[in-house]
Amino acid sequence: MSQVKTDKSVKSVAATKLVYPMVKEYYAEANKVAQDHSKKICYVTGAGLVDLCWVYDNVLPVFPENFNAACAAKQMTPPLLEVAEGAGYARELCGYFRNHTGYLLEGKDRKDVAYPGGGLPIPDFLIADSGSCYFHLKWWRETERIFGYKIPCYLIDVPYIPPRMTLDVLEQHYLDYTVKQIKGALEFIGKATGQELNKDKLREVVRLSGEASELFEEMQDLRKAVPSPMGSEDALSCLMPLVQWAGTQQAVDFARSLRDEVKDRVEKGIGVLPGEEKLRILFDNIPPWFTLGLFNYLHKFDAVSVIESYTYFFHYSRGKMDPDKPYESLARKYLYGCWFMTSVRETVNSLIARKAIDYKVDGIISYALYGCKIATGFLPYQAKIMQEKYNIPTLLLEGDMVDPRDYADGPVKNRVDAFMEMLLERKKQKS
Ligand code: SF4
């Protein structure tokens, strides 16, 4: 089995250094409850849904996408990817799916591998949504098949928002449809766990989900400061607490401590770099989790990746998570995931451009994922628009988020070098 070494990241912010220990602890807890049957384990997809699980006291949701990212960060994905490919799954499929499937088929039974927190436990039920990615539905169906259709599975259909609507102006029947899906999912979890729906708990989950997102949004706004108080090597690690624990006090506490620390750094003028910050970068798309050190590599050019599109995708509040309208709030949140990934590109392009302007970025690095069509197909078009309409250059890199085997570290860095030199020269000429 092949093994590929890449660069680990070096973090600057104390709160983000705590994330990996929290991840390990969470999986250890999940393995414990799976063994003593004190709680039911549910596999959930990203960008939503997890809130629904936290409404029930006896459910512990786990998030395979995060587990895959943790495996990649610990350089343990190649053997799992090879198992999945050996079983006939194409190498061009989503890397998250391949890694998870390789883990389920063989990886989980290997006693010689120290997976984070002891690995991903076997689920009691599965729940997925099409909101952020229609591939989730196929993935969860395959997981169901691997377990011999013995584990109940519920799929939520979140409709795509057509161009005539915006997130703020949604036609009522779109909301009604999504609310119906959410109610169906809650009923399914209730049946799978033997618990009644507690409406007060539902309201509390919505309140906490909104509060954590608002704190995270506040922190993101603070990152507009020059020098940048926190780079992407730190920020991307924060997604796990925010996504996994959306709807819990734990997520709120983490988001608050992160916000406070970033605020303190801004007030004291503490930047990521020890010296002058010459370039500011926006990183677009899911990152290569196996080499987050790529963000540290930018420091060589006195450059910092100051903001990401990906971290904007997971925190929805917009002041609209209203505990008194819990179903509608959750529906809006899931529709947001769908909107960001699939809606009219002009709208998303202008959102990316807005970020680039607000965060004073000099250039964009977009990461095209060969296994993720949904988040990649439009990137060349987006790069063209950024250049022609907003005069912001884009470097388009190719790879996968968890599969390091096709990642050519040397050539990638050569291209980064050339891009950084061009940006520095451009900036010199402008000034
Ligand atoms: S959005 Fe892309 S990376 Fe995420 S699950 Fe879907 S195909 Fe995979």
Image: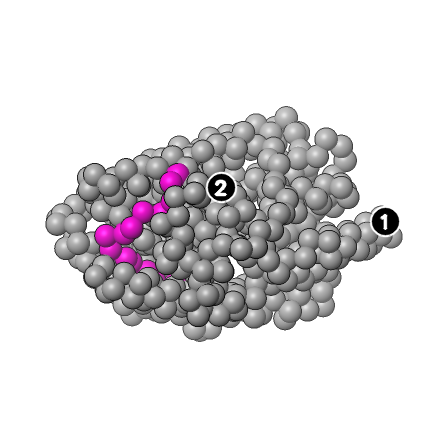
Q: Which residues are magenta?
A: 117-132
Residue 53 located within the stretch drawn in magenta: no
Q: Please, what is the three-letter code of the amino acid marked with disc 2?
A: Cys
Residues packed near mark 1 inside 10 Å, few (<14), some (14 to 19) or many (20 plus): few
Magenta region includes residue 131? yes
Residue sitting at x 47%, y 45%: 70
Most foreground residue, 246 or 203: 246
Give the amino acid type for the residue marked by disc 1 in the picture: Lys
Q: Which residue is mark 2?
A: 238
Report which quarter residue 198 is drawn in.
top left
Instruction: Tell which of 70 and 162 is nearer to you.
Output: 70
The mark total stands at 2
Question: Residue at 52% across / 39% down in the picture?
Answer: 219
Judge from the rendering whether residue 221 lies leftward or rightward of residue 251; answer left or right: right
Identify the mark at residue 428; answer none if there is no mark: 1
Crowdedness of circle 2 by 10 Å Cα count: few (<14), some, many (20+)?
many
Q: Nearer the viewer, mark 2 or mark 1?
A: 2
Spot occupied by residue 196 in the image (x, y as percentages of width and height)? 12, 48
Q: Is residue 190 visible?
A: yes
Q: Position of residue 225 (x, y in %)?
A: 64, 39
Q: Is residue 264 left or right of residue 130?
A: right
